[in-house]
Amino acid sequence: MPQTLRFHLNDRLIEDERAQPTTTLLAYLREQLHLTGTKEGCAEGDCGACSVVVLDAEAAGGPTYRAINACLVLLPMVQGRRVYTVEGLRQDGALHPVQEAMVRELGSQCGYCTPGVVMSLFEACYRRDLREPWQLDDQLCGNLCRCTGYRPIRDAARSVAASCPQDSFHARLAAPADSIAFTRESAGRIYATPTSFTELWSHLAAHPQARLICGGTDLSLLITKRFQDLPELVSLEGLADLRGISRITDGFAGWRIGATTNLAELEAACLADLAAYTPLLRMLRYFASRQIKNRATVGGNLCNASPIGDLAPVLISLGAVAELRSAAGSRRVALDEFFLAYRKTALQAGEILAAIELPELPANARVAAYKVSKRRELDISTVAAGCYVELDAADRVAQIRLAYGGMAATPARARNLEAALLGRSWSLAQVEAALPALAHDFRPLDDLRGSAWYRGLLAENLIRGFVLETQHEARPNLSQRPSATVHLEVVP
C-alpha cells in the first residue's frame, strides 16, 4: 500500500513522504507550496474563499470537475487525483475563459474572494447538467463576495456556464485515473484508504478506535476549528461498492444509495432516476453549498447522528432501511431505529453503514420535506421534517410517517401524532383535532436557534402546511424561484 502522498497539482506531479495526513489541503498549498492565491476565510466551508477544483474520476455520469473547500480536505483525500488552483488556469500565457469573463464583467473588486469565485465558475464551465436557474444559483451560493459584487459575478457566470470549451482541461477528463490507495502508519498513528473490504476489516481490527472518514466536511472541523488531534483515521473513499445509486428488484422494489455517494450525485439522481422522491430534492436544495455537496456523503450525514442532520427526517419518512456491514456479514435496520441516543447509532464495533435502501413509492403516497432555518441557504436547521401519508380508497390515512429533526436529541418519528391521525380522513380539520398529540412526542430543544415554544409551534405548522400543500399535488416540489442570494438565468 503506497505511503507516499502522490497527486497532480496544476498538472505537476507532487510527491511527499513527510506531510502529515491531517494537514489540510489549504494549509499545504499556502504554507508548503506557497500558492497563496487560494485564501483562508472561515476555515469551515462557509465562505468559499479556499475553493479549488478536483477531477472526480469516479463520478456517476463520468469524470467531472468539482469545486471543493480546500480548508476541509485532508491531504490523503487528494491521493492519485488532479487538483487545480487559480494559479493553474492560465494556459500558454492566456487567461482561462472564466478568468476573462470575470475581468470583462468587472467581477473582482478587492480580489480576496475572487480566486474562490473563479474556481466555482471553472466547475460551472465544464458542467453538462446546468438546466435550471436554481442550479446556477446553487453553483455560486457557497462563495461570499464581501464587496457585494454579485451582479458582475452573475454576468460572468452566465457567459461561461456549461460552455465546455474543448481545451486541455477538457482533454484531462479522459485521462486514466490513478489509484487513490494510501496508508501511512507509524508510532500509533494511521491514515488508511483501503481499496478492498478485506483491507478495511483488517485496519478496523488493528485500530478499533479509528474514526471513519470519507467526505470530511464535518469531521475535518475538529482539526480546523477545535484544533483536535485525530491520530487514527480510516477512509471509506477507496471502496467502489459503497458509492453509487442503483435499482433494486430482488426481494425489495426500490433503490440502493451507497453510503459514500456524495450529495451532488444524489441531487443529480433526484432530477433524473429518483424523480419520484421529490422530498429528497427539496431537502438537498437548501442542504449546503455546492462545494460541500461535492464532498459530503449520505453515510457521513447519517452516521454523524446529529439531532439536526438534514437527511435523516426525510429518509425516515420515506421508510428507508440501513444496510450495515462488518467482517461477520451484513444486516438491515430500519432507519427510524438507527439513531439510539445523542450522537449514538446502532453501528457496532467494526461495522459500517454500507448503503441506504429506499422502497418504491406507492401511487397513493403523499410526501414532502421541510427545512426551517434562520437563513434560507447554508444554514443549520432549526426544525426539519419529513412527511409521508398513504390514503385508502375513502381518503383515510392508511399509513403515516412523520419524522422530525431539531426537536430532540435524535431525529425521530412523531408516533403519538401518527397514531392520532391513523384511520382519519386527510383534512385540515382532522389534523387540527389530532395535533395536541404532538406535545407528547417531543420535549423540544431550547437554544439559540429556537426556543422550545417556537419549535413546538413550528412542528405543528409544518404538518398544517403538509396537509395544504398535498391537497392538490401528492408530491409537491419546490418552485423554480431563485434559491440563493444571486439570481442567475440559464443561458439558451
Image (spheres, grey):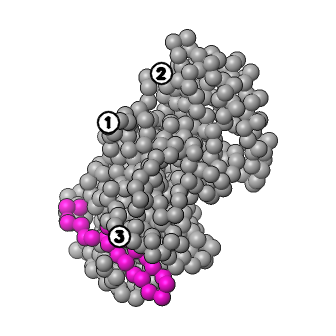
Mark 2–mark 1 distance (CA, rounded to whole Å): 21 Å
State the image coordinates of residue 10 (x, y, percent, origin top left).
30, 74
Residue 249: which disc?
1
Which residue: 46% across, 35% down?
A: 278
Q: Tag 2's secondary structure?
A: loop
Q: Tag 1's secondary structure?
A: loop
52 and 386: which one is in front? 386
Q: Is residue 180 magenta?
A: yes
Residue 101: quadrant of the picture: bottom left
Residue 443 appears left or right of 218 = right
State the image coordinates of residue 360 (x, y, percent, origin top left).
41, 32
Residue 9 appears left or right of 449 = left
Which residue: 59% across, 50% down?
A: 339
State the image coordinates of residue 331 (x, y, percent, origin top left).
45, 49
Asked if 137 appears above or below 49 in the picture, the reply is above
Residue 246: quadrant of the picture: top left
Q: Amino acid at mark 1?
A: Thr
Residue beneath label 3, please? Answer: 199
Q: Are marks 2 and 1 in contact (CB under 8 Å)?
A: no
Q: Amino acid at mark 3?
A: Glu
Asked if 60 appears above or below 172 in the picture, the reply is above
Mark 3–mark 1 distance (CA, rounded to whole Å): 30 Å
Residue 364: which disc?
2
Mark 2–mark 3 distance (CA, rounded to whole Å): 45 Å
Asked if 405 appears above or below 367 in the picture, the reply is below
**What residue range appears in magenta?**
173-195
